[in-house]
Amino acid sequence: MDRHEMRTKAENLMAKLTLEEKIGMVHGAHLFSTQGVERLGIPPLIMSDGPMGVRQEFEPDHWKAIDRSDDYVTYLPCNSALAATWNRDLAFAMGSVLGEEARGRGKDVILAPGINIKRSPLCGRNFEYFSEDPYLTGELAVPFIQGVQQWDVAACVKHFAANNQETQRLWVNVEIDEKALREIYLPAFYECLTRGNSLSVMGAYNKLYGEHCCQSQYLLHDILRQEWGYEGVVISDWGGVHDTEFAAMSELDIEMSVTDDFDHYFMADPLKKAVEQGKIPESKVNEKVIRILMLMMQLHMLEGGEGSRRRGTYNLPEHRYAALETARESVVLLKNDTGYLPLCEERIKKLLLIGENAERIHSKGGGSAEIKALYEISPLMGIKRLLGGNARVDFVKGYESDAQEKSEDINWQEKSLEEGGGHGREEQKEDQSAAARRAALRREAVEAAKNYDTVIFVGGLNHDYDSEGLDRRDMKLPYEQDRLIRELLAVCPELVVILIGGSSVEMGEWIQDAHTVLWSYYAGMEGGTALAETLFGKVNPSGKLPETFYKNHMDCSAHALGEFAGEEQVAYKEGIFVGYRYNETFGVEPEFCFGHGVSYSRFVYEDAVYEEADGCGYVICRLTNTGKYPGGETVQVYRIKEQEKAPEEWQQKEAHLSELRPLKELAGFGKIYLEPGETGQIKISVKTRQERVRLGVGSSVKDIRLWV
Ligand code: BGC
């Protein structure tokens, strides 16, 4: 059925509905679903979070988990981990698992993927997002969406748009120049909604140019519908609507919220009344209903529609294997200066693991992205499983997180409209007994470390920090981990440091002395397996940072030039200079740059050429794996502007920013796998601009090997 036919069918069906029935379809009738119209065979639209798996079941009208045994699911690596693979096929595979499981659990819309730009490392939801780079985000989010939707489930790409902080997320007004909006914050949405054909999109909580995004004329009407011609369904974030008239007259289709007074939602009884009183034309409601019906047709949800709907299922072994494959490619080896890794499993008789993250389970946290995982392999279990019974693996905590107060009766989401929807982390009060406990744990760990040849520290962040509704204060490792790592390095210079988190952390206090450092994003149910396999060389690390790892948050442009996190207003004064675009152009050295990641092998780059065919540009180049291990390498192509690095004073004079272009911008990438000694050719499609720039081909934004 073509779009025209589909629309005619939807119009005919819509014409049979009463106003009340139509109103039931455009707002949440329960926490995660709308109202169906049984007499005409229109089912409710059933939604679920996203993005690392299908969320647990809640009672329809209460934020109370049903808590049965049938809603455990595959826990996938978070979007940042997926981005670290730089692998489009894995993005498709992850989307496909999510789609199949969502359908298997009876869902129609999965509230994923999250594709907001990582503007600052301090944003609490960064782990749900891919990258600081719009091109990388779009390139991975598009196959992810295609993977989801092949299962007759709609993806709901979120949060549209400029939703880059949690502090006051319901009220903060983003002030940004249009160039930055269009070059940095909108392109991935454009790709997902056009090329990716995401059947739905979620509006953001925040305001943009003074309008709430979920009811914005500019974003939803002018850009989304008019300019992009988007015909899919726009769903509000939960509690993102603030006014009946604005919402109804905007291009929003469905209002969702967190409270249980469903009939009082702005697009419920108040909308019905407004239409009856002639304040809002019924045609506005009709348009929304038509779009919802068209979405249902595409998902084969309507009786008498074309084709049968895919059934889906969940917790297949293949799903766990796909999660493992992604986890394997997501581990980023930041440093292996002395070649200490990989470890040799036969030689290890005794190994010490230190740090709470070695055994912490992360799936349950983070906010709406929480997962009731079928299981989660911790690094401790991953290593023990790999080494087996002949090696002794000991564990000491070394540090511990603060005990969280948990109330069984109150779900954070129910309260999430309070406090503007989110806040910054409060300064930690120094608690004497906690400090004493930490000192004791540290002493115990340092003493223990002296007795082992192989010592591995596993620390970083957790979802008390990487969390919806909360921004970090700074990039420091919590729980005095810096001190612990320093003291461990003093007695154990070959210490392997593994950090787990959703966004970069400061490492300055010890990074010079640490030779071996690994980074893992929250890598899903098989994260511990992937880490262990990497440590012992069963996997050659091929992850690359999808974001800049700053030395300090003040080296990030959102903080250095712009504002973060604003309360009522937040000015994105840094414009297009987000992430490496700023650091490269202004000569600000990061700790680890965008695209960085070490392998156990070495890859030699040769003979890069640029070709054009059918109006598309390609960079072709040869790579040889000169190392001992088979491995993958992500080849990155950057547009490199021939300009002097901007002098420091440019930073002060914002006016000039608008005249500058970033020194480097990612234009293409591809991944190649080579056996030891093997040479292969890679062909990378590149996104070029009209103006002639040079293209740099390399292993990271800083490590440019060839020019074309
Ligand atoms: C989040 C959304 C999520 C929704 C439903 C909101 O708090 O911002 O990303 O999909 O809740 O749980």
Image (tube, grey):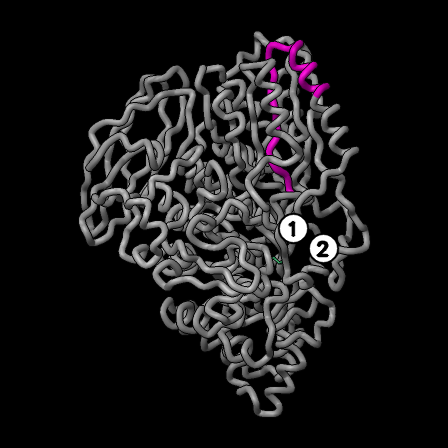
Front position in the image: 275 or 296 = 275
Front position in the image: 320 or 632 = 632
Residue 242 image position (x, y, % from top left): 60, 73
Q: In which quarter of the view is residue 457 placed? A: top right
Is residue 255 found left or right of 130 in the rendered image? right
Disc 2: CA contacts within 10 A as few (<14), some (14-19) or many (>=20): some
Task: Provide the residue span drawn in magenta.
Answer: 443-463
Q: Residue at x 44, y 36 (%)?
A: 545
Q: Are marks 1 and 2 in contact (CB under 8 Å)?
A: yes
**Which residue matches tag 2?**
412
Q: Is residue 673 above or below residue 658?
A: above
Label 2 SS:
loop
Disc 1: CA contacts within 10 A as few (<14), some (14-19) or many (>=20): some
Q: Is mark 1 within 8 Å of ligand 1?
A: yes
Residue reaching furthest to the bottom: 277
Residue 30 image position (x, y, % from top left): 70, 66
**Which residue matches tag 1?**
367
